[in-house]
Amino acid sequence: MKRVAKFEKVSFAEFEPASLEIFPKSDPKELYDNIKLPCRATKGSAGYDFFTPEAFTLAPGETIKIPTGIRVWIEPEWVLKLYPRSGLGFKYRLQFNNTVGIIDSDYYYSDNEGHIFCKITNDTNENKTISLDRGFAFCQGIFIEYGITLDDDTTAERNGGLGSTSK
């Protein structure tokens, strides 16, 4: 098995404003101190579980942007793909707003420290409300190797997240 990445916490200075925006009634320092690094649940698991930094409830149709407090250093030619945990998708139709999160290896070096955010929606068609406790595994990341075309001559460098590579 290739070892191609390393999870880390972003700095508190990066995490604090994001956490206050989403969880204004919570103590950012307490949330930060309790961030769990992603991990696999079993030796046969492909996905690394990401955990909620704070409890929240989503009624049908509601959305939340979760600041995970996590960044990841990834070997070149690898990518981290993020998906909702299977059980949450199956039971609640919990979905990522961008369908699949793509974390490129160069995102780690962005001004925001490569802080990984997950925007999820309770897309239930059964009128189910979902409540997740702090520290609940809500999504999973899988590392995938990728290739490029023979005539690829890209030299541009990233600085930012969503939309930064199309500017």
Image (cartoon, rainbow, N blue to C red):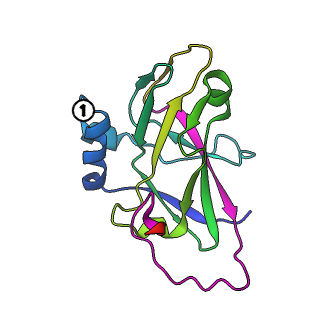
Helix, strand or loop at label 1? It is loop
Q: Is residue 37 left or right of residue 44?
A: left
59 magenta-colored: no
Looking at the rendering, which quadrant does residue 27 occupy? top left
Q: Quadrant of the N terminus?
A: bottom right
Q: Position of residue 82 (x, y in %)?
A: 59, 48
Q: Is residue 154 magenta?
A: yes
The percent position of residue 110, horizontal first and vertical second, equals 39, 67
Residue 145: quarter of image: bottom right
Q: Amino acid at mark 1?
A: Pro
What residue sits right under mark 1 in the picture?
24
Would residue 138 appear left or right of 55 to someone viewing this image? right
Determine whether, in the image, residue 164 is placed left or right of residue 39.
left
Name the quarter where the C terminus is drawn: bottom left
The x, y position of residue 166, in whole percent, is 48, 67
User: Callout 1: 10 Å neighbours few (<14), some, many (20+)?
Assistant: few
Image point (71%, 45%), residue name: 45
Vertical comparison of 33 with 146: above or below: above
Provide the residue span drawn in magenta: 135-164
Quick one: which residue is furthest to the top in this view?
A: 127
